[in-house]
Amino acid sequence: MKDDLKERAPDIRWRTGVRVLTNVSGAIVLLFLVYSLYIAAINMYLDTTGMKGKFIRSVISVAELLEDGMRVDKGPFPTVEVTPFITQKTTLKLYRDVGKWQVVTGEIRAERTVTGQFSYSIVDLPTYLNTQRQAAFSLPYTIMFNKPMEVTPRPEHSLKQLSKIADGNVARLSFSVSTLMSPDQLMEKLASYDVFVTELPVYAGELKEFNTSFSKSEADYYVPHLSLRPLNHFDENNQLSSSAMYFTPEDKGAMSEHVSYMMSDLEWMTTHIKYNGVDIDKKRLAYLKKHGVQVYGATVTGPVRELEKLQEQPEFRDFRLGLIEVWNWE
């Protein structure tokens, strides 16, 4: 009997092992199916309630209103990952317009928790090491000093660089203006140049009505700012229905539509999104409702020889040369 049990022991252990393995595998498959059904149900809920659309709109609005000159890739079917804790995550490409090309310069990684907290980070893809080519706009002196100031003009290194670039190239160029202007006034000054305008920095009370971070160089102050950019139109379900790429000379005298969409987007952001800085943006919104929208610079793109002509305007200063590409203009 003992000998018989000894002979059968390996077979018993093998069958027991197979049974345990089968049970474990079955449990894993069952858990996977339950998890898949759970995630599918969450996705269906987020789709039917419009929460995915709201999330993607949040990414586009926050990035394009608050980040200098960045545009978000607005492909028709953005990928949204949903975690078991109902946190939505996405990664979208960021680009800047250089001539008529959209040049990828980074990506935005965003998430929204089940409690509604929205956060994001920008990952830059710099072309050159240790070189900043982002726009920076200095506030008009009248804002900080309440009167015009006689300031010794500084060398415009970007204009010198621009003069060395051969014909047949296009570039991005940003500049500040010496006094606040309405968007239509600034577009009027740019209308005679063969350039596209990609953004206008908006003054919304920074350092006067409320404190915010800033940097300083001699008498120039630089602050985080809102950007007036070509309109994005969202429908009642937060789906993007139309989007413009540039301001063109045809927009001269018709900037009120773009301003209206920016104001409605800012109001939507501060009402529907919980993000770092929302309290400051509420103050900006209140200031703009009271004082109207005024701008203090622009980022433009076009042929390098045409960009050089902008120095003809005495109000334009603090030029910053951005990305450069081969000819892609008409």
Image (cartoon, rainbow, N blue to C red):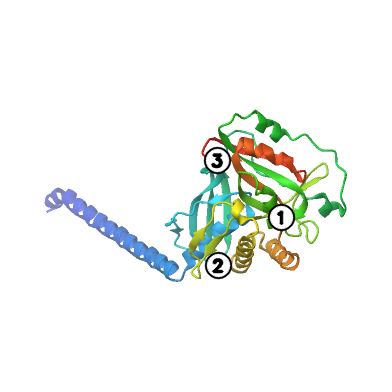
For mark 1, does the 10 Å Cα neighbourhood hold few (<14), some (14 to 19), or many (20 or more) residues?
some
User: Can the viewer see residue 253 in this picture?
Assistant: yes
Snapshot quadrant of residue 163: top right
Q: Where is the N terminus found, in terms of image quarters?
A: bottom left
Location of mark 1 (residue): 185
The local secondary structure at tag 1 comes to helix
Location of mark 3 (residue): 125
Residue found at x 88% / y 53%: 147
Of residues 119 and 327, the one nearer the viewer is 327
Q: Earlier in the sequence, mark 3 or mark 1?
A: 3
Q: Residue lying farthest front?
A: 192
Name the kind of residue labelled 2 in the image. Thr
Between disc 3 and disc 2, the foreground one is 3
Give yes or no for contact between labels 3 and 2 (Cβ–Cβ under 8 Å).
no
The local secondary structure at tag 3 comes to loop
Q: Is residue 145 left or right of residue 165?
A: right
Counting from the top left corner in percent of width and height, residue 104 is at 52, 43
Between disc 1 and disc 2, the foreground one is 1
The span from disc 3 to disc 2 (Cα, nearest Å) is 31 Å
The local secondary structure at tag 2 comes to loop
User: Can the viewer see residue 113 in this picture?
Assistant: no
Q: Is residue 68 left or right of residue 154?
A: left
Name the kind of residue labelled 1 in the image. Gln
The span from disc 3 to disc 1 (Cα, nearest Å) is 34 Å
Q: Earlier in the sequence, mark 3 or mark 2?
A: 2
Q: Is residue 128 left or right of residue 288?
A: left
Give yes or no for contact between labels 3 and 1 (Cβ–Cβ under 8 Å).
no
For mark 2, does the 10 Å Cα neighbourhood hold few (<14), some (14 to 19), or many (20 or more) residues?
few
Disc sitting over residue 115 in the figure: 2
Counting from the top left corner in percent of width and height, residue 270 is at 63, 66
Name the kind of residue labelled 3 in the image. Leu
